[in-house]
């Protein structure tokens, strides 16, 4: 039987066990699961940072790291779905540049159809995204040197997807995947990035990628009858998510506070250490929302310490 590997979490907001169960029941695949706990989490992060060779943007890649660690016990090669979202407009955030593209072409009715689809399928996501835009714009001042704003979703959808595939997103994901898999002597293959698939998907009209607020439209149609509808028709698919906010408020908080309070941290020329510490304490006290800047700054500090002192875990 085909072997599959999944990561699950005790926190239901980040757990997809019921969808895994649905696929296993329908296909008969053999499934192995790992549920990362908090024991040894900090040590795992140190080793993960060493394997990646550079700071990473979020703890989402820790989920992939755990899956690779699980898979090494049974296989030497895995198949992964990287590249499908970037080529087929799979992320909900792509809906905005798609609407912008339709309006730019004068396709008012088509744009209205997408707006209705967003309101029907993704309303809660956009409220969350709007709050994150506000919070993260306020926290740009945590970094020194006025870093330029990266307009990831600027331009038409074609321009956005091309940028995602070649510059802004997919290269990072492939780097992380390569390091995570090689850390456990596993070869990861990505069939959606076969050049013939890439060329074909690039030739498709945009309404085959997004239609009525439904992302990856043509793929969902193609797998009808192969993948159970509760999975195929989901509008809330998660990536390799982790309870980053929960961990940063709980298990990781003492270590992060220690980092942000240290003389080494305050002496760095990259961030406003006093403001970082104050903002993080406000988050811990429930006075402000979480944003991933906290993790990114903490991760950069860990990386600096590890490679300055030569103390990274192997």
Image: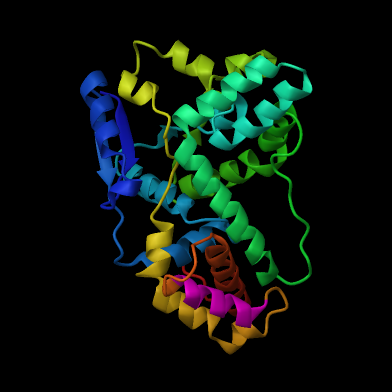
Relative vertical location of residue 82 with respect to residue 130 in this rendering, above or below: above
> Would you say 164 lies left or right of 193 here?
right
Q: Is residue 64 above or below residue 258?
A: above
- Judged from this view, the residue extending furthest toward the bottom is 263
Q: For this view, does 221 lie left or right of residue 144?
A: left
**Residue 173: percent from the left, percent from the top?**
57, 43
Which quadrant of the rendered structure holds the N terminus?
Answer: top left
User: Is residue 82 visible to the viewer in this orientation of the structure?
Assistant: yes
Residue at coordinates 61% horizontally, 33% vertically from top-left?
A: 94
Q: Provide the residue span drawn in magenta.
A: 272-283
Residue at the image point whose x is 61% and y is 21% from the top: 112
Position in image of residue 214 (x %, y %) = 50, 23
Q: Is residue 198 visible?
A: no
Q: Quadrant of residue 5?
A: top left
Image position of 254 with respect to 154: above or below: below
The image quadrant that residue 124 belongs to is top left
Q: Which color mode does the image show?
A: rainbow
Q: Any magenta on residue 273? A: yes
Q: At which x and y percent is residue 239?
A: 45, 40
């Amino acid at each position: 039987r085909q072997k599959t590997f999944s990561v699950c979490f005790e926190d239901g907001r980040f757990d997809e066990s019921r969808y895994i169960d649905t696929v296993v029941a329908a296909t008969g695949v053999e499934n192995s699961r790992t549920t990362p706990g908090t024991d040894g989490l900090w040590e795992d992060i140190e080793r993960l940072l060493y394997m990646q060779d550079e700071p990473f943007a979020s703890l989402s890649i820790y989920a992939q790291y755990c899956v690779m660690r699980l898979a090494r016990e049974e296989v030497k090669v895995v198949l992964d779905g990287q590249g499908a979202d970037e080529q087929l407009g799979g992320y909900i955030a792509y809906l905005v540049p798609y609407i912008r593209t339709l309006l730019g072409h004068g396709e008012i009715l088509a744009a209205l159809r997408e707006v209705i689809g967003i309101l029907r399928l993704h309303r809660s996501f956009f409220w969350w995204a709007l709050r994150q835009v506000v919070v993260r714009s306020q926290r740009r001042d945590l970094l020194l040197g006025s870093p330029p704003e990266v307009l990831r979703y600027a331009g038409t959808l074609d321009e956005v997807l091309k940028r995602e595939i070649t510059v802004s997103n997919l290269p990072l994901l492939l780097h992380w995947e390569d390091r995570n898999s090689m850390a456990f002597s596993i070869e990861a293959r990505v069939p959606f990035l076969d050049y013939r698939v890439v060329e074909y998907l690039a030739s498709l009209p945009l309404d085959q990628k997004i239609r009525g607020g439904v992302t990856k439209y043509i793929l969902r149609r193609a797998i009808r009858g192969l993948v159970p509808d509760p999975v195929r028709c989901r509008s809330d698919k998660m990536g390799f998510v982790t309870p980053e906010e929960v961990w940063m408020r709980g298990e990781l908080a003492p270590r992060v506070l220690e980092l942000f309070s240290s003389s080494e941290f305050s002496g760095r020329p990259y961030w406003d250490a006093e403001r970082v510490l104050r903002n993080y304490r406000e988050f811990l006290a429930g006075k402000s929302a979480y944003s991933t800047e906290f993790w990114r700054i903490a991760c950069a500090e860990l990386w600096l310490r590890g490679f300055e002192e030569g103390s990274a875990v192997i």
